[in-house]
């Protein structure tokens, strides 16, 4: 159940480019979580929340060019170092491309936070959902979901604290 909060200033992007970017961010999020972006079950769980900051200040003054903040949240165990790096790189590239040359392509204007929600603390549908629950839904098989979650969480534990 990946979720993404996209902070995009009003008017920073042409409307069609912004719409296309939000779809592309969904694909990037799913792919870097380890899901197939074309899978309808996985897509049904991928939510993007668009936030419109009233203003962004840099060094205490209004920013001269748009600044973007993208917060990707996935269940614990879904990101590893490679997936996290890929998520940050792909999102940054996609945001800058969506500007269509309207601003200098400065990656310092795009900040991406790839966060994992601790297992057993993801609430939705009136209950707590674990990685096993979510994976079982996407895979269409609760037993496969438990096996997948066990493997991903064991790998996370073996890699040390984040």
Image: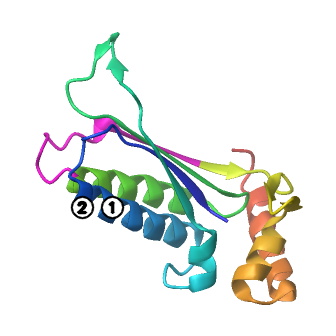
Q: How many marks?
A: 2
* Label 2: element kind: helix
Residue interval drawn in magenta: 99-114
Find residue 16 and name its label: 2
Measured from the top left, where is residue 109 in percent x and y? 30, 36
- Give the SS element for disc 1: helix
Q: Are marks 2 and 1 in contact (CB under 8 Å)?
A: yes
Find residue 104 and report its horizontal and vertical position in percent.
13, 40
Q: Rounded to the nearest whole Å, what is the CA distance between mark 2 and mark 1?
A: 5 Å
Task: Name the residue carrying label 1.
Answer: 19
Q: Along the horizontal axis of the image, is 104 left or right of 67? A: left
Residue at the (76%, 72%) spot, across then down: 134
Q: Nearer the viewer, residue 71 or 14?
A: 14
In which quadrant of the rendered view does residue 47 lie?
Answer: bottom right
Q: What is the x, y in percent for residue 56?
A: 36, 24
Q: Note whether 24 is above or below 92 in the view shown.
A: below
Question: How many residues crowd mark 2 within 10 Å: few (<14), some (14–19), many (20+)?
Answer: few
Compared across the picture, whether 29 is left or right of 152 comes to left
Is residue 153 inside the magenta stretch?
A: no
């Amino acid at each position: 159940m990946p979720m993404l909060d996209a902070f995009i200033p009003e008017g920073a992007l042409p409307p069609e480019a912004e719409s296309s970017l939000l779809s592309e961010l969904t694909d990037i999020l799913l792919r870097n979580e380890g899901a197939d972006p074309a899978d309808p079950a996985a897509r049904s769980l991928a939510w993007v929340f668009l936030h419109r900051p009233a203003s962004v200040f840099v060094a205490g003054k209004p920013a001269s060019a748009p600044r973007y903040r993208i917060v990707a949240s996935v269940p614990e165990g879904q990101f590893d170092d490679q997936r996290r790096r890929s998520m940050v790189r792909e999102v940054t590239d996609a945001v800058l491309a969506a500007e269509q040359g309207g601003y200098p392509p400065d990656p310092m204007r795009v900040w991406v936070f790839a966060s994992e929600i601790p297992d057993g603390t993801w609430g939705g549908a009136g209950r707590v959902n674990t990685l096993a629950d979510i994976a079982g839904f996407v895979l269409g098989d609760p037993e496969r979901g438990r096996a997948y979650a066990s493997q991903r969480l064991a790998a996370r534990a073996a890699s040390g604290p984040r």
